[in-house]
Image: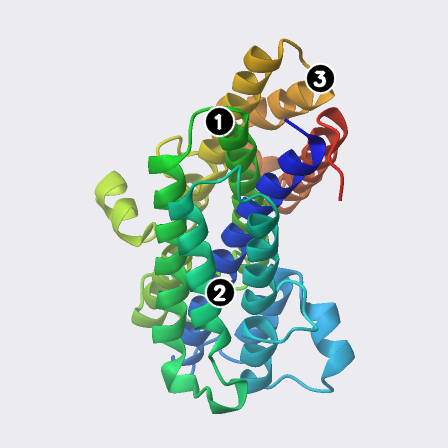
Amino acid sequence: MLGRTAHDLYWLSRYIERAENMARLMDVGYRIGLIPRSAGRHQEWHSTLKSTGCAKGYYEKHEKLDARAVVNYLLVDQDNPSSVRSCLAAARNNGRAQRTAITSDMWESLNQTYLEFSRLNPAGIRLSELPDILLWVKQRSALFRGTLLNTLLRRDGFYFSQLGTFIERADNTARIIDVKYYLLLPQNEIVGGGIDNYQWSAILRSVSAHRSYKWTYQESYKPWRIAEYIILNPEMPRSLRFCSNEISEALESLAHDYGGRHACHRVAEDLKRPLAATTITPIFQTGLHEFLVEFLGRNNQLGSEIAEAYHFVS
């Protein structure tokens, strides 16, 4: 496969995953912002900007924090390269450039999503409409993902798409935990109180884990259990461990097909190994923030090594 094709398929999946992740984080910000007297109420939109990596760009454009301005910046602002609109546009451009490398179902899903979203009038978006818009974004991402999984041949194009999806997802999950974990540790609110439980439920919802957490632990929300679940559970599809396993599997498939291994394979193992060989206790003992920063660094390095190994051309 040409480096340009590999690059476009990899980033197509990253952009779709990023659009979905943006919608998930905005949904958390909206939900927590509705809680009366919430400890995180006034900080939540700022933490949403930090989680998405968009804080610097937002404050360069806006003098103060305003919920409507944050929503517009993250959802439709074309000056923000990570807004939902920008991600969908970039994904569509990559898909259009590689029409022969993706299936017709994938293209139709991608193109229709972009066209429908483009009809949104930024000035006409009301905050009360936000949950429905964000749900639609998540559903369209799931539709594209379903067409990819059900129609694309299990060859190199599929494996590069998998890499893009799970590198982006791992990055997002790590950022959610790092930014929001300590923000939501109870201060004046009683642990297990109504506000506390709603906040932790919202965080679990951001990774589609609020119900599966209950199935797994059969107990009320506990901050350290939630961290353990989102970081280390190998069965939860948005956990760091699950993502690292999928990344490693895709790279092994490429190594088998292409008959060679590269530095990215070693970095992938470095990303995966600590997650399979530890528990949440030593992570907290050495520092959760430090652990996540190291993970994010390795994940970013992995993306660079993949680009170099497979000659991505941007």
Alpha-carbon distance for marks 1 and 2?
Answer: 31 Å
Q: Which residue is mark 1?
A: 245
Q: Which residue occupies 65% across, 73% down?
A: 78
Q: 68 or 260, which lies in front?
A: 260
User: Which residue is label 3 attached to?
Assistant: 262
- The answer to whether one can see residue 278 in this image is no
- Residue farthest along the bottom direction in this orientation: 124
Q: Earlier in the sequence, mark 2 or mark 3?
A: 2
Q: Which mark's residue is nearer the viewer, 2 or 3?
A: 2
Q: Nearer the viewer, mark 3 or mark 1?
A: 3
Q: Secondary structure at mark 2?
A: helix
The picture places residue 54, in percent across and down from the top left corner, at 67, 66
Q: Secondary structure at mark 3?
A: loop
- Real-space Cα separation, disc 2 to disc 3, in angstroms: 36 Å
Q: Residues within 10 Å of mark 1 (few under 14, many from 20)?
A: some
Q: Are marks 1 and 2 in contact (CB under 8 Å)?
A: no
Three-letter code for the amino acid on which mark 2 is drawn: Tyr
Q: Which numbered tag is attached to residue 256?
A: none
Query: x%, y% of residue 204?
Result: 38, 55
- The residue at 52%/45% (across/down) is 169
